[in-house]
Amino acid sequence: IVRTGTACTPVSDTGISVCMTVAKPLVSGGEIARFAIFFLLLLAPAFALFGLTRRLSKREIEAVDQAARNNESDRVLGLVMRGAQAGYWEWSHTTNTIFFSDGASEFLGLGRTGLVSLDDLLARAPVEVHERIREAFSKARTIGWIHLSFPVTAPAGRWIEMRGSLSDDPNTGEPVFGGIMLDVTERKQAEDR
């Protein structure tokens, strides 16, 4: 598209006018570049939001996928542990709290998984073994591992064995004790015969 401009001027006392017509493109290359920059500046926030939204959506999808894999791993680990009559536990010696898995909680008669205190664990054992359990946990702070067996009060006659060692929590980097809890009732009964 071309635009034209005409300019006329009279020639002194002759009655004649000189006119000149100039044709120019409607939009020049420089103007196109300025319009492009203007529109890009207008659209930049929209592009940034779109990119950020896509990036967040991708991260959310990755997080959901990882959570699904973790849930499946936990389910398989739970099946293996129940089949082996075992559970797992983690003890933070800085907060003196113990996490028990489903299987470990079941052995102790807790009825739930989650964090409990050392006193909650002691409440599940006969009073005569409390000092031995406290001593094992206290000694673990210096030697870096735990291995102890003790009876629980409910169900009567059940024996539990806890084994574990010190390692760093992958999420917090804090040193924690982690290990396995076994139902060793049959072994203890065989030893008593």
Image (cartoon, helix red, strand yellow):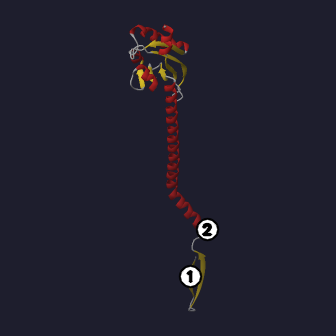
Q: In terms of secondary structure, where does tag 2 sit?
A: helix
Q: Earlier in the sequence, mark 2 or mark 1?
A: 1
Asked whether residue 177 appears in the rendered view, the answer is no
- Measured in 3D between alpha carbons, the distance from the residue under mark 2 to the one under mark 1, in whole angstroms, is 25 Å
Q: Which of marks 2 and 1 is in front?
A: 2
Q: What residue type is labelled 1?
A: Ala
Where is residue 26 drawn, in percent x and y?
A: 57, 74
Give whichever of 188, 174 is nearer the camera. Answer: 188
Q: Does residue 13 sit above or below 146 in this rendering?
A: below
Give whichever of 28, 40 is nearer the camera. Answer: 40
Where is residue 128 drawn, in percent x and y?
A: 41, 7
Where is residue 76 drawn, in percent x and y?
A: 52, 32
Residue at x 49%, y 51% (from the top left corner): 49
- Mark 2 crowd level (few <14, some 14–19, many ≥20, 10 Å Cα): few
Which residue in the protein does label 1 denote?
7
Where is residue 191 drawn, in percent x and y?
A: 51, 9
Q: Which amino acid does label 2 sit on?
A: Gly
Residue 33, numbered circle? none
Which residue in the protein does label 2 denote?
29
Q: Quadrant of residue 3?
A: bottom right
Residue at x 54%, y 28% (from the top left corner): 170
The quadrant in which the N terminus is found is: bottom right
